Image (cartoon, helix red, strand yellow):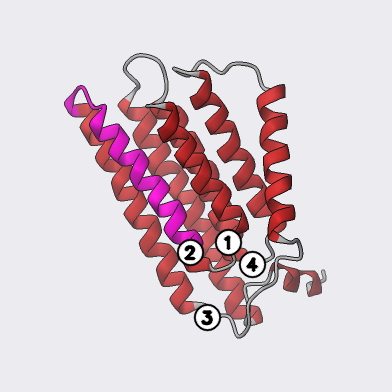
Amino acid sequence: MSGTFVWALVGLGLSVVVVRRRTVAVGLVTLQALLLAGAALVAAASGGDVVAGVALGIRGFALAALFLVLVARTREPRPVQAGIAPLARAGIAVALALALVWLVPAIGLESRAAERSVLALVAFGAVTAATRRATLFQVIGIVLVENGLALAALELPGASSVAIEIGVALDLVLVAAVAAVFHERIFAEFGTGDSTALRTLRD
């Protein structure tokens, strides 16, 4: 993959950190996932690579459908405020990404740009999950990390294992699906997807 492509993925990830609307965030992570699937198909050198690319595409559409259903089923009576301003979130995300790039040694991908992009997506996902009070945004943060891991699988040197790529596409979808179920249960219990409502729970 070209450096421009992987940094476009990073730009989409940073946009997720700052946007306010859930539907926009869903669209951004879905576009990321589909770009990864398209890149896998373009670079496919065997039938197994095509299968892996198709699996990534199915993952993207499945997550988009899941999130849009959740948005429709969990309409918030009022927007859930993040508590941290968008520019502050972006600053934290960029700082964490730079720290990871500085601290983490080479991880053996085909290019250093790909490695930095993977670390940036992991950082952006972590910041999204940590700084947003809306539980759906926290799930979207998990998906950002998943997209970073999918990029890492695609950027392994040589012929990457189909099992690895399909495993990234399907196993981590289960994580997002479980988190989505928790989001819906929280909304059903408290009438909001604001994670601060959980503070009212006591043993």
CA gap between label 1 and label 3 equals 17 Å
> Callout 1: helix, strand or loop?
loop
Residue at the image point whose x is 78% and y is 72% from the top: 201
CA gap between label 2 and label 1 equals 7 Å
Residue depth check, mark 2 versus mark 3: number of the one nearer the observer = 2
Q: Are marks 1 and 3 in contact (CB under 8 Å)?
A: no
- Residue 165 drawn at (x, y percent): 36, 32
Q: Amino acid at mark 2?
A: Val
The quarter of the displayed image where residue 170 is located: top left
CA gap between label 3 and label 4 equals 12 Å
The boundaries of the magenta stretch are 25-47
Q: Are marks 4 and 1 in contact (CB under 8 Å)?
A: no
Q: Which residue is mark 3?
A: 75
- Residue 38 drawn at (x, y percent): 28, 39
Whichever of callouts 2 and 4 sits on the residue coming sooner in the sequence is 2
Whichever of callouts 4 and 1 sits on the residue coming sooner in the sequence is 1
> Callout 4: helix, strand or loop?
loop
Whichever of callouts 2 and 1 sits on the residue coming sooner in the sequence is 1
CA gap between label 2 and label 3 equals 15 Å
Within 10 Å of disc 1 (Cα), the crowding (few <14, some 14-19, many 20+) is few
Whichever of callouts 1 and 3 sits on the residue coming sooner in the sequence is 1
Q: Which mark is residue 134?
A: 4
The quarter of the displayed image where residue 169 is located: top left
Q: Which residue is mark 2?
A: 24
Q: Are marks 2 and 1 in contact (CB under 8 Å)?
A: yes
Within 10 Å of disc 4 (Cα), the crowding (few <14, some 14-19, many 20+) is many
- Residue 118 drawn at (x, y percent): 53, 32
Residue at the image point whose x is 53% and y is 32% from the top: 117
Residue depth check, mark 1 versus mark 3: number of the one nearer the observer = 1
Q: Which residue is mark 1?
A: 19
